[in-house]
Amino acid sequence: MPLLDVRDLSVTFERRGTRPVRAVDGVSFTVEPGQTVGLVGESGCGKSVTSLAIMGLLPRRGNKVTGEVRFEDTDLLTLRPKDLRDWRGRDIGMIFQDPLSSLNPVIPLGVQVAEVLERHQGRTRQAALREARELLDAVGIPDPARRLKEFPHQLSGGMRQRALIAIALACKPRLLIADEPTTALDVTIQAQILTLLKELVDDSGTALVMITHDLGVVAGLCDTVNVLYAGKVVERAYRHDLFAEPRHPYTHGLLQSVPRLDVDRGERLHQIRGSVSDNIPWPEGCAFAPRCDRLVDDCIGETVPLEPTFRGGALRCTNPVPKEVAV
Amino acid sequence: MSDALVEIDDLKVHFPIKSGLLFDRTVGHVYAVDGVSLTIAKGETYGLVGESGCGKSTLGRGLLRLVEPTSGSIKFDGTDVRALAGEKMRQFRRRMQMVFQDPMSSLDPRQSVQSLLVEGLKAHGLHADAPTRLKSTLDAVGLPASALSKYPHEFSGGQRQRIGIARALVLGPELIVADEPVSALDVSIQAQVVNLLGDLQDSLGLTYLVIAHDLAVIRHISDIIGVMYLGALVEEASADQLYSRPLHPYTRALLSAVPIPDPRVEDRRERMLLAGDLPSPANPPSGCRFRTRCPWSQLRCASERPALRVFDDSGQRVACHFAAEILSGKLRPHEVRAELVRPDSPGADAGGELIPTQPDLPTQ
Amino acid sequence: MTRALSDHKRRRIDELIARTSEPGGVSLLRDAGRRLLRNPTAIVGGTIILLFLVIAIFAPLVAPHDPIQRFPELTQKLTVDSIPGATAGHPLGSDPLGRDFASRMIFGARQTLFVGVLATLIGLLIGVLLGALAGAIGGWVDNLLMRLTDVMLALPSLLLAITLVALASRSTQWTVIIAVAIVNVPIFARLLRGSMLAQRESDHVLAARALGVKRRDIVLRHMLPNSLTAVIVQATLTFAVAILDAAALSFLGLGDPDINRAEWGLMLGVDGVRYFEVRPELAYFPALAIILVALGFTLLGESIREALDPKNRR
């Protein structure tokens, strides 16, 4: 049985005076215990909204969330906010892009870590602080005993992200959701954090949902990758399959358009025409159609369904890239 | 080798750190750029790469004198740019233009595209043939003529960056300094802008100084690449050479840190992880600035700052005492303990607060 | 198997692309205007102000009588403990001197709006001038001007206005206007200077410098216009405060001593208080009118602020 089973999740922004916008449109995916699943896409594809909806962190006002988010046997969407708070932090941890705004600026770091342990595991402040020191040590923060008394602004961006990871993993959650955890960091610090995440996840058996725009990050980290476009999953595949044989023209184009360090540099990059925000919301058929090079009649009209492929993969395309042409 | 268009010699840009309630007192300096010498050949692309706080953006702005250099010399096509004053400098700007990272914030939201493009022409008395210039420029950057009446907020990120490029291009400059020209854009749009920059260079014979933190992008568009660390160049080489034979330990670390979108490569890769964070540019380490994080550092590195020297016949330059020993494997890496680095002054992030211009953080 | 795209589907896609693309050519200001018109709060505020403006401008046409004329039929009924209420021809009854109260209320709109608007505009003008100087020149000019505004801001605004009015030997309505205007100067000056400083560090000003745009043009075409929006919003909100301040000064007896002048603050402060037990309407109506106008300006100001906020676009 999957640890997390997201079924037909949709999020519609309903604001006064504007037309409703469907930011997430029927997203389904599963996460097995200990598995690492990637949600990849560009800005506006709905990946971050998906993660917020799963955690129940979207404001109730102005956002309509439908579908199911099953965590083991419980549908998180039906829980009362108070009960959901018990799940968050204890069973599901979360890391955000900006560690500074995710940490409370006026509370010492040690207390912030300890509070999670006190709340969810009933530790005393003393015991919790002792454990907090071990946690900070485990995420590679130098001299953790002294860091406990310090405030977030006294740490560098990389160290803050480590502290946030320590908080997220404090209660040994079974699922960790990481939303662009390294986007605000420099590349050498990103490498540190990704390596750390990978080690922690491997050691503790925590399942990880990794949300990112960076295909490189996904390639090294995720078991299964979901590619999102305009609020829909357009392709899902085991990572080796996805990178070796991307079938959706969008995935294919995306992979070809990024310059790579390990191949000889060619003259021109492959480019996808247009841009994500040009024709959204797209009224019928496939939302990628106006940018696609492989248009056929079926792309317009009926909504294109997400069809299962092999090894747990799925594809939403009427005219996919043939296997032999793929990269 | 072709003629040099830009020659920078020992350029320094230091920002004073002010403190005091009623009367400002200088309590220290941020050594944003601390002695950089480089040459950009006509028609070539020089890529400047480094992490946030390394001074690459400040160097670009110092070259254009958008921030005033503290010392050093800048020669542009034989002209001493630092000697130009007032009106002369203003007129000279026509020849060296800039493209910014965030096209949204660098385009005045109140101006239509037409007025954005005409503004530069007016400033240089070129608006007599504005209509033809505008048309050819829009063509060149791939925007329709109907764009003229639109406003920046009505475009997508990629198109906005095209407007930013058009604004620089319309003056017919020889040099374009592009500061993180694609890092604010979506992945699928980055390729469009990278290709556009390449096409424009081919057709107009432009010279570029491209500043970016993304090594893969820099490698793709640059002829020569300079790697910066804490205000100084640590290595310089042709794009292919740098990637096939990185000499400086920092370059190695940077290259190994870049994720590659291919699981087969990623699974086999041995990462060279750097310990700790970038030290504060207000309080750089003695000797070699990279020594606090360098797995090959020796005693000499603490006492003597290595100069950027030509390594061999290939022209590759490196600022490391032990580049040859590291390359040959004679010197073995050792364990590095991470030093805790404080963000400068309260509230400042990686020196960003102290530098009056935008910090060069990668944003997405 | 090659599958091609048929012509009619191709056309359908082009049509959809055309339909989902934005037509464009709408400036931020016009866009903000559109959103303003869709905002019910703005409509309510705007309607209130418009209503009062129309009344103020066309007061001689709207008012049933001359506001300073004493009517025998009213004066005859005035006694120590009664002031006549509504009668035929005088819908709101009489004021303590036998004048038509309704007409005085209507002409009061004229006076009150005149004082409030003029005080705000004068304050705005001087404030913007000083703020722009400080923001554009910087250095010791900036330091000097800002310390000056600090001193002014340190005093409570009404106290400052009272002091200024008291300093003037003879009080006219102009002393009130000038006093209220001066009180508003530092607010506008600081606001403009602050937002001009922010503009100076902004990317698009840097871009203009890189283009080689002249310094004067950068200040006048980039820094100033982009800073003014904040000031305009503030001005709308200041109208409300200015009207209240002017009313307060009149209420305290520091306004124009002319007993014929119909102004809400004066009416509330003098007649309203003196004859409150005899006829409380003399206080209620001016107070209500002041509150309504102030509310109208506040609602409109808040909606303009909201409309101009780029976060609310689309």
Image (tube, helix red, strand yellow):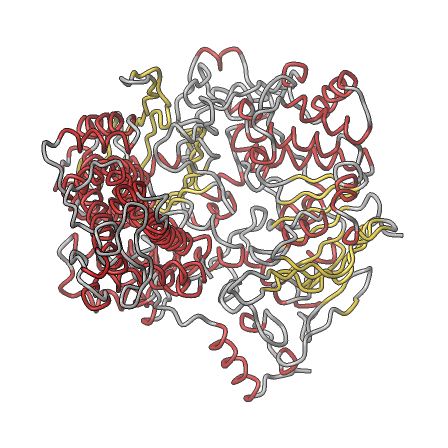
Left or right of B277 in this view: A9: right
| Residue A163 seen | yes
How far from the left and from the top, in percent, is residue B101?
41, 47
How far from the left and from the top, in percent, is residue A202?
79, 37
The vertical placement of A259 against C154, above or below, is: below
The vertical placement of C283 against A156, above or below, is: below
User: Residue drawn at (66%, 37%), measured in percent from left and top?
Assistant: A194
How far from the left and from the top, in percent, is residue C158?
28, 33
Left or right of B159 in this view: A108: right
Quarter containing the N terminus of chain C: bottom right
| Front residue (pair A175, B337) | A175
How far from the left and from the top, in percent, is residue C178?
16, 40
| Front residue (pair A102, C113) | C113
| Residue B63 seen | no
Residue B203 picture quarter: bottom left
User: Residue drawn at (52%, 34%), measured in percent from left and top?
Assistant: B246
Residue C88 picture quarter: bottom left
